[in-house]
Image (spheres, grey):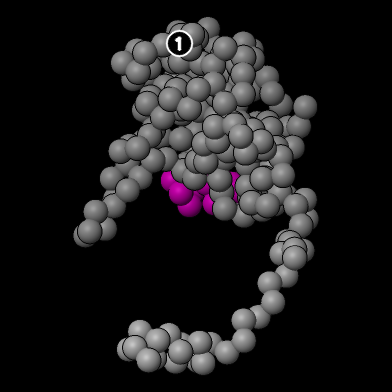
Amino acid sequence: MTARDLVLGRIRAALGDTPAVPAEVPRGYRPAGSGAADLDLLVHRLADYRATVHRCAEEGEVAQVVHRILGGRRVVIPPGLPPHWLPDTVTAVTDENLTADQIAAVDGVVTAAAVAVAETGTIILDAGPDQGRRMISLLPDVHVCVLRTDQVVAGVSSALARVDPRRPLTWISGPSATSDIELNRVEGVHGPRHLHVVTVPRA
């Protein structure tokens, strides 16, 4: 018997019999769609991440909020963004295969969202027509994201049930931020330094 055989024999003896692997892994620990979505919790989480939340009583107020944030400036928008979300005070540049330099040169971006997770304070974009390419939500310094209240779900499993995993998903939890080894927080390294979430009643 070689030393290798001896070592492997001892490992097998210590492990004992291999437990049977179940045919199906149980997934009932938190079924998708369980739990009530809590908008107040989402707002609390976003504020904790240093995002700014604007709660609108009706969709018609969105343009007023965008005016207060980006009035007099240039913004990039996805092709399917509802035009009534934009005030006359902003210069909108529609993303029709803009280059990275062109997108980085604007002052902000306005998008919609696919879904938001109250438990984690996370907003998910799926590159839909009203959200656009991932690049337009990462390069500008200011991101204004309009979120319908019926897009808010309780947990991550509920959010995953609403999105297509084959689409390019962008998960946003507050403004872009990172820290070095001394825990000095720096914002804007990997995306916008300023995130504004505008909530509107369900359609």
Q: Quadrant of the C terminus?
A: top right
Q: Nearer the viewer, residue 65 or 188?
A: 188
Give the left or right position of residue 119, taking residue 150 as reference. Answer: left
Q: Residue at x 28, y 45 (%)?
A: 186
Secondary structure state at the residue bearing disc 1: loop
Q: Is residue 183 visible?
A: yes
- Residue 17 falls inside the magenta stretch: no
Tell me residue 19's x, y (percent): 65, 80
Main secondary structure type of the part rendered in magenta:
helix
Label 1 sits on residue: 97
Q: Position of residue 115 (x, y in %)?
A: 65, 38
Point out the stretch of residues depicted in magenta: 42-50
Q: Residue furthest front?
A: 1
Image height of 192 relative to 108, above or below: below
Q: Looking at the figure, which quarter contains the N terminus?
A: bottom left
User: How many marks overall?
Assistant: 1
Q: Residues within 10 Å of mark 1 (few under 14, many from 20)?
A: few
User: Residue at horizontal 71%, vertical 26%?
Assistant: 58
Which residue is at the front of the view, 106 or 190? 190
Question: What residue lies at 32% left-to-right and 89% top-to-bottom?
Answer: 3
